Image (cartoon, rainbow, N blue to C red):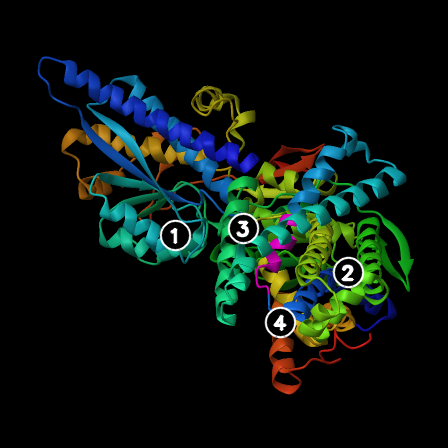
Amino acid sequence: MDGLGRRLRLLGAVAAVAAVAVAAAGCGGGDDKAEAKKEFAIGFQGPLSGENQQLGINAYNGMLTAVDSANRSGTLPFTLRIVASDDQGSPEQGPTAAQKLVDNSRVIAVVGPIFSGATKSSEPLYSQADLLSVSPSATNPQLTSLGFGSFFRVIAPDTIQGAAAADYIAKALKAKRVFSLDDRSDYGAGLSTALEKALKAHNVTVTHDSVNPTKDYTSEATKITAAGPDAVYYSGYYAEFALLVKALRGKGYEGRILAGDGSNDDQLIEQAGADTAEGALLTCACGDANSDPKAASFVAEFKRVNSGTKPGTYSGEAYDATQAIISVLTKEGTGATRASVLSGFRAVDMPGVTKQIKFDGHGEVQGSTVYVYEVRGGKRVVLGPTTALLKP
Amino acid sequence: MASGGQIARLAIDGLAAGAVYALIALGYTLVYGVLRLVSLAHGEVFMLGAFGGLYAARAALPAGAAGAGPGVLACIGLVAAGTVAGGLAGAVAALGLERAAYRPLRRRGAPRLAYLVSAVGASMFAVSLAGKEFGRRDVPVPGLFTDQTVLRVAGAPVSAETLAVVTAALGLLLAADRLVAWSRLGRSIRAVAQDAECAVLLGVSLERVIVATFVLGGVLAGAGGFLYAMTFHASYTMGYVPGIKAFTAAVLGGLGNVRGALAGGLLLGLVESFGGYYLLDAGYQDVIAFAVLIAVLLLRPSGLLGARLGRPA
């Protein structure tokens, strides 16, 4: 029933934006000049259905917040609209979802894709169309070195997350043996590679394994328990991590269980159960807007637009990505084209709610902090940035 | 590596998975015995049963008690309630399936292939409906148990959850086996399986037997669905893989053979568990199951125990 409710809310939200757009257009029409305001569409690509839809929905809601505020501000010489394209987070469906946005001539820029695998398969289409795409969340390290001219991201790559997580595991948790498991996705494999490299540099014994997303982690849990690690780190998404945690605890594993940003969502707690998820640690190159005083106005705005929902993982990043796109559009005015937005975006330098939004030549956002979250009493709590947690 | 504890662990995992496969496989085998029909939508009966049990368990679990963990008796009651509700939901789903997808074809004397197409259609309908109603994501069963070890078998820890799943599933399997062997209904099912025309001449109501067979298969699959969801999750696509694995189990034991489905399910669970650990990594469990299916079809198409629902068990 939850899923249905969420879907309805999403529909409602889309309808609300449409209504705002229509109302704005209507006002223009009522004017003596009878000149409708120009409308630009910003595309969204990410999982809006499927097992890991929550991460897509978080980002979508962040984007909606930015677009809605911009439209309401009344200072834009144009109106904005969102065109959403659901890729279910899968690499196979990515190109289809991207093509839909590329073919829509009103779409001037895209927020997304959300998942790394889908990004890798979709970016060739965006590059070819000179259509800017800004991902709030695709963290696979390779993505910025594959020659995609139109790809930017407002989150640090997993080389940074992996290294920071390894620091934390080796120095703060003082683990000697670590079991690193990934889901064989572009995201998971990239993160586990970065993590293991950094762990080995700390002289930690690492056992690596990969398992495609499945429901049955019992035998993997048996294998992990048999290896007897101090800590298990999972590089993959929350739907699978929830099952893995359940299987591990069911097998009597008592060490620390960690995962990366793909598992950093409250859905983890709901799906694994609060008791089972207790003590699980999550690393993410994303802070929690809800506990950041500087982001208070963003959180309030987000709740207003999304009928009381709190920002989730990637909501702030998606908001920043959208704001950055809007800032370029504002500068260029109604004459903006896909190509001009793309070239204008390289020069973006603005304060965002998550970090300063400024890119290097590869489309990588500059400077980033990795945070550690812990599940405590059925809630995700920010322990702090890894650098602060290492201090004795 | 091959310590005693490890072997016991793998055996318990295999038994837990295998018992659920066997529960679903019985439905395949009973329906095949009576109608010579592979009901490919049976996995969806399992899925709908899981949701039925899940909502019953949610309704029965008093809000707020989940954190503290209900007492042992309450837990047993909840598992029983969920299993019964799962069974009921499975029975309703199986009946609906029979009514909507198979009976009209039977009345018309449609060819075999039509049933298959109809089953695939019904399966797609059920998956889409469930996706719409229950959400297209994993839905957890409320945590009935904390994940504590309640007993050790040969050094292997067994959680309360696993114990409950194995006990309930084996109990149901035993009951089903006895029902088919001893009861009047079981006798008429076996009679129809052996020779439908002759059974009808001797006064067995064919329609009643068909309905009873679907209901029995539905109860077992639905209850199995709830037990499966307790271990993992319920989701609208959950019927697909276990459905095919149970079909493998039924073929493995001999399609149409009740004991065969039982043995096939348990054996498949064990093969998967040990094979996933010793031969390949855990990600290859499904590969192992389907390799078994192919091997059986090539080497012994009638299954290990042969097809013999009609013959005295």
- Residue type, numbered disc 3: Ala
Stretch of the chain drawn in magenta:
B39-49
Residue A125: name its quadrant. Answer: bottom left
Q: Is residue A275 magenta?
A: no
Q: Are marks 3 and 4 on the same chain?
A: yes
- State which mark lies toward you, 4 or 1: 4
- State which mark lies toward you, 4 or 2: 4
Q: Where in the figure is residue A232, as x and y percent of width and height?
A: 68, 53
| Of the pair A336 and A371, the residue shown nearer to us | A336
- Residue type, numbered disc 1: Thr
- State which mark lies toward you, 1 or 3: 3
- Residue type, numbered disc 4: Arg
Q: Distance between the residues labelled 1 and 3?
A: 32 Å
Residue that numbered label 3 is attached to:
B126
- Answer above or below: position of B312 versus A331: below
Q: Determine the chain carrying the residue at label 3.
A: B
